[in-house]
Amino acid sequence: MTIEADRYGSRADTLVFLGCLALSIVAMTVPDSIRRPFSQALRQTILAPLLALQEETATLKTSQAHVDEITAQRDSAMLAATFLPELRSENARLRSLLGLGQRLQTGYVPAEVLHESGPTDPLTFLVSAGRTDGVKTLDPVVSPEGLVGVVSAVDEQTSVVATWAHPEFRAAAMAADGSVYGIVAPHGSEGPGIWLLELQGVPYRSVVPDSALIVSSGLGGVIPRGIPIGTVMGQGVDNEHWERTYLLRPAVHPASVTHVMILTGTTRGGGNLRELFQDEGKSP
Amino acid sequence: MRRTDKYRFWFVLAGLVLLHFSVRSRLGDDRIAPDFLLLALLMYTIRAAPGPSAGAGFSVGIIRDALTPASFGANALAHTLVGYISSWSKAVFFAENLFVNGCIFFGGTWIRNLVVSLASGELKGQTLVWELLVWSPLQSLMTALVGVLVLIVLGRWLSVRFTDA
């Protein structure tokens, strides 16, 4: 395709160029009353399909941005929906905690559990109540479902709670009917039974039926009597001589607790809190 | 040259015009996005004689003036000058070389912006300096890059024979 490119231009080319230049200058000098209708005519004829195309592209661009916005909103809604059951559960837990607080009336400090994202979090965790709230070392920590653990260290504003899953945790316990006494301790530190408790030191002649509720016995004066600890799942395999060991399903799992109550003094139940935890099992 | 080559040539130019009104708005800042319409004009002028190139430049310019009525006539003047000069300079250099064509795309875009800026009288002072020394070179560079890319990909359709510089 040569199209006469290899020449400097003829006189006609120069005349055309000068004519176009002149027309351009005229276009620059004509008044608005002429240039506006002319521009409008061009936009409505030659440029119309091209402007329509440009408009479509702009609309498409806006639509795409709109779709992105809707997608972001949908994702946010899905994220919120994901947490909805958890929020409901927490709400129900707070309601039951409120109910327990009304039953206890005095002698407790409510606290929020400050979970950390670590594998040992269920063994010990921080709560948002400390010395200024009247919390002391070895104060029992409960939730509406039962015993969570005891306070192991107290700071000004926070406290460290050693849960029942902590290897050093021990609690004097008994069957809810008072027929059997023993010591509750974590079942182990490894394997599938790590989140179970065991009731140790039960006399060989005493038999605890499955599903029996085990509560704190109050012996030792640390944990008040009557706080649910767990239910019997069956006998442990490592029974020794003249005593039995029972596996317990804990009343509450430390990892699922978001709010707790720290028992700091004498409550309405006095020495026996059994009747205050009558709702155990009905709570989520 | 086959007869179909001529149609392919116009097909490429039409494609560039369509790109200008469709894709360009999605290529980022208007000040630096490649000017496909001017590129189509330059593609034509490097193949055509100076007279028709000036006429084509005037036509493209007056169409652009219709889109930007505030500086009516400035685009017609600028595109006429660019069309004529690019065609004339191509005849002077007479080398169908990729680098030369890239320089024509770059220079054509920058000169067009210079003439429009001065003739319209809309840009003054620091704004004019920024336009001529920052935005125009960037847009010229982008236009030149796209032009070279088009020549590389569709060089046969445009009947451009590349030789070493």
Image: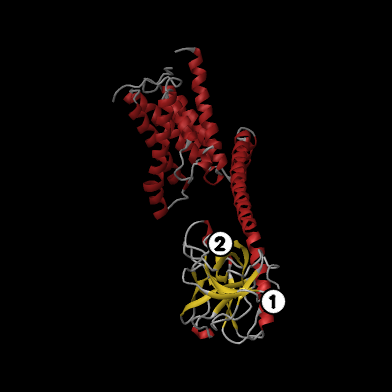
Of labels 1 and 2, earlier in sequence is 1
Q: Residues within 10 Å of mark 1 (few under 14, many from 20)?
A: some
**Residue at image location 43% in from the left, 46% down from the top:** B118
**Residue at image location 52% in from the left, 45% down from the top:** B71
Q: Is A73 situated left or right of A170 in this image?
A: right
Total of numbered circles in the picture? 2
- Foreground pick, A197 / A108: A197
- Foreground pick, A205 / A4: A205
Identify the image quadrant of the C terminus of chain A.
bottom right
* Image location of residue B39, percent across then percent down: 45, 32
Q: What residue type is labelled 1?
A: Gly
Find numbered disc 2 in the image and state the secondary structure of the residue it sits on.
loop
**Residue at image location 51% in from the left, 33% down from the top:** B60
Query: Does mark 2 fall on the same chain as mark 1?
Result: yes
Identify the image quadrant of the N terminus of chain A.
top left
Circle 1 residue: A99
Q: Residue A15: in sight, yes or no?
A: no
Q: Is A99 situated left or right of A1 in this image?
A: right
Look at the picture and state if A95 lies above or below A249.
below
Look at the picture and state if B16 lies above or below B123.
above
Look at the picture and state if A125 lies above or below A70.
below
* Image location of residue A276, percent across then percent down: 68, 78
* Image location of residue B117, percent across then percent down: 44, 46
Q: Check the residue under mark 2 and report the chain it is in.
A: A
Q: Residue A236 carries which label?
A: 2
Q: Is A248 situated left or right of A1 in this image?
A: right
Q: Check the residue under mark 1 and report the chain it is in.
A: A
Q: What residue type is labelled 2?
A: Gly
**Residue at image location 57% in from the left, 73% down from the top:** A182
Q: In which quarter of the image is residue B161?
A: top left
